[in-house]
Image (cartoon, rainbow, N blue to C red):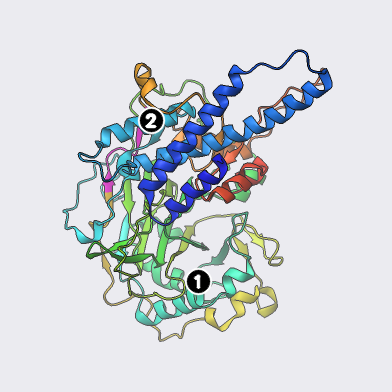
Amino acid sequence: MESSLLQTAESLRATGSCDDAVTALRTVIRLCNNALEDADDSAPDQSCHVQDQDQDQSDDDEELSEKQQIRALALYQLAVLLLQGYSGTPSVSPSPSPSLLIKEADFCLFKLGFCTRLHSNVLNYDLNHFNRARPPLPLPLPLPPHTKLAVVYDNVFSPSVLSALTNALISSEIFWSYHNYPTSTFFSYNFGHPNHQNQNLLSQIALDGLLPLLLPHYPSLVDCTSVEIWAHRRDGEGHHQLHYDLDERLLVEGKGELKDRVRSPIVSSVFYLDVVDYNHGGGVVIAGAPTLVCDKKISVDCFKEDQSDSEEDPDMLGAMVYPKINRVLAFDGSLLHCVVPGNVVKPSDSEGEGEGEGKGEHSRRRVTLMFGFWKDVSTSDIVDETTLAPNMIGKKGKKGKPSWMNDKAFSSLSPTTTIINEACVESKDAAEHIESVWANVEVDEAEEDQWLVNDCEDVDFTGRFFLRERIEEIDEEVLSGAIPPPPEPEEGPPSASKQTNEIQYMSVEEATQLGSSDSSDIKKRKR
């Protein structure tokens, strides 16, 4: 029953009925709490045959383990929805205050073992941001005056280039089907500069279009030798975990000290080709989740024990940029960034989807192209569609290219084609400045009885939106794959390792599959 109700809650959330999802999740937690408390109160019958008792105990343990995992999923999803501002009682007047929702969310996270979370101002972002005029806010950064956390341009590519990209990545399936997207591992392609081989539509818009456009903001791009290109096609409300853009091959396979194996692009950028939008409450709502860029670079000293006290206020500046068709976001390639969990909006019954550019069969998807401009980076040879890796390079001629690159949809542009739109403009107020990305999980255990939350078994979640100890644990997780494991003890039985389930904030079915996957597979997903 708890499992089916959890799936119902996920379905409600996915269709925009988030308050109903909150109510369902609270019910799931209550049912699991009752079942687990009943199990604690009941003692095995000592008169039973020992073998039968052991079998019964094993069955009970398996059932309880399932309920613990269901409860953990429900607590996590409930915390996210509460921090997004959903109360479960929208018709109640007066509605619960935001501080009360945050308090309940913090109790959920506290019981899951978290002590730091994304600030509610990040998760409860403004869905009507495009309909509100707001002056740009100053961003006092401890960086050179010309440096910004985010540079944003709108109306970037000319109509002919935007049409070509739409045809290649929205109307056509060849790129996605070739890679069997979505994939379990990260992959990207690398094209050299200035005399880039295997020139095609994507490399041209990057090296002949975006690079000159961004050079005045990032003078170090003069040292760019290649561009890394990758793409994503996700639901509009889909998120992507906090991560760094890194030279993965160098980090994992390179020799020498760790600090010498941590390398990032000069500049990373995101191009929004398609977004989810529809009419809601009389205005167009862009439902796609924003990209968050944090004023934090990776630290190889993260494993030191004398880090700052986790109880200190975890201040960190950030910039949040909302998806918009034909928009480019650029930032220092070494900065921490993510796509925050989406705030799903339920369209009005009398109003349908928007009819902007790129609308059609795939209008419910967020399609993005990412470009990383490198000075030096490790590359991988293209083998076939089943062998995917970061920064893959092809050889000259059709035989050295993957089939999607030979498709006419990705053909090189004519030399006379104008790549950057004449109407391209820097949107200096497009980035919403976040004064504090993180907040502490604060609980008053004296008030614990008013919440539906019992102590929860330790479960590991991906996403990195909630942290167990300190912000540096993000760096620890990213860099852990580059540090050799400690040697096995020569004598004695092997120590029992802690069993965890790695769960991502996604559909219940996907979360369950991820929960049973091997953690080594997950570590490959740095981006």
Q: Amino acid at mark 2?
A: Asp
Q: Is residue 436 left or right of residue 254?
A: left
437 is within the stretch colored magenta: yes
Residue 443, above or below 140: above
Image position of 452 with respect to 95: above or below? above
Lateral position of residue 384 relative to residue 80, left or right: right
Task: Verify whether residue 398 appears in magenta.
Answer: no
Between the C-alphas of marks 1 and 2, the distance is 45 Å
Which residue carries the number 1 mark? 203
Q: Position of residue 27 (x, y in %)?
A: 45, 37
Q: Residues within 10 Å of mark 2 (few under 14, many from 20)?
A: many
Tell me which residue sits at (36%, 63%) in the image. 328
Report x, y in % for residue 123.
Answer: 35, 44
Q: Nearer the viewer, residue 146 or 403?
A: 403
| Three-letter amino acid code of the residue under disc 1 | Ser
Decide which of tag 1 and tag 2 comes sooner along the chain.
2
On screen, residue 203 above or below 28: below
- Relative to 476, is 448 on the left or the right? left
Determine the secondary structure under disc 2. helix
- Name which quarter of the figure residue 384 lies in: bottom right
Residue at figure coordinates x 45%, y 68% from the top left? 206
Q: Quadrant of the N terminus?
A: top right
Q: Which region shows up in magenta?
A: 433-441
Where disc 1 sits, the SS reads helix
